[in-house]
Amino acid sequence: MKLYYHPLSGHAHRALLFLSLIGAPVELVHVDLAAGAHKRPEFLALNRFGQVPVLVDGDVVIADSNAILVYAARKLGRSDWLPETPAGQAAVQRWLSVAAGQIAFGPAAARLITVFGARYNAEEVIARAHAVLAVIEAELEGRDWIVAGATPTIADVALYSYVARAPEGNVDLAAYPRVREWLARIEALPGFVDFQRTPVGLAAAA
């Protein structure tokens, strides 16, 4: 398998993290976003949206980080990470939708302002970030993982990267002790790989 990625992309880290956690052998292909490599014809042939990550597994091409999580879990038979029951799958899907929605338009967008100079309204996206973090904080009451159970799922992986680096977007995690404990649990998992840090936002003063 080949994973086309960029080290500062939380979406790419999400895919890389899961592949590492399950010990899947993967060749990393760096996509130089600054040079516009993601908009060149050869990359657009893999993903017409011109976004990382993309997973290539033989003749199969999977674009979108959450799709990669689902594909890898199913391909490698990891029902511990993606339950096979309808209720279990639905519970995971709920949080994959949050990762693609509230996380993308909250903490991820806030970080895009400081790391990549995106022209979002900082006050608005930081408020969105705190709104979703408050929900996650409440959801984690009495449990170790975002989906109730004894082990993590791809839902935890989907949420991790942008929540962990929320301070880089000036989103303070101090008010969310359960979230911080949950991040630490993920970071203690065998096979964990860190998401490259950037000294911006609140992280610059840490």
Image: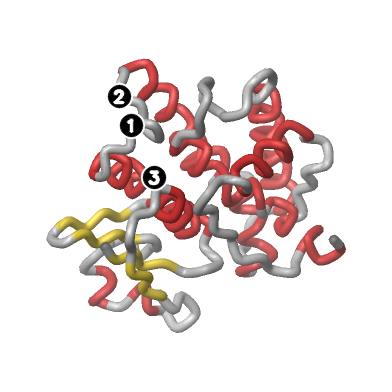
154 left or right, relative to 169: left
Q: Which residue is mark 3?
A: 66
C-alpha separation, residue under disc 2 versus residue under disc 3: 17 Å
The residue drawn where x is 64% and y is 56% is 120
C-alpha separation, residue under disc 1 versus residue under disc 2: 6 Å
Tell me if residue 103 comes above or below residue 14 in the rendering.
Answer: above
The residue drawn where x is 35% and y is 52% is 64
Tell me if residue 70 comes above or below residue 16 in the rendering.
Answer: above
174 left or right, relative to 95: right
Mark 3 packing: few (<14 Cα in 10 Å), some, or many (20+)? Answer: many
Q: In the current view of this chain or complex, which residue is farthest to the right?
A: 205
7 left or right, relative to 83: right
Circle 3 SS class: helix
Q: In the current view of this chain or complex, which residue is farthest to the bottom?
A: 35
13 and 191: which is toward the camera: 191
122 and 1: which is toward the camera: 1
Mark 2 packing: few (<14 Cα in 10 Å), some, or many (20+)? Answer: few
Q: In the image, which is nearer the foreground, mark 1 or mark 3?
A: 1
Picture quarter with the N terminus? bottom left
Q: In the image, which is nearer the foreground, mark 2 or mark 3?
A: 2
Circle 1 SS class: loop
116 and 56: which is toward the camera: 56
Picture quarter with the C terminus? bottom right
Point out which mark residue 84 bears. 2
Q: Which amino acid does the dot numbered 1 rest on? A: Ser
C-alpha separation, residue under disc 1 versus residue under disc 3: 16 Å
The tag earlier along the polypeptide, 1 or 3, is 3
Q: Are marks 1 and 2 in contact (CB under 8 Å)?
A: yes
The tag earlier along the polypeptide, 1 or 2, is 1
Q: Which residue is mark 1?
A: 79
Tell me if residue 181 comes above or below residue 42 in the rendering.
Answer: above
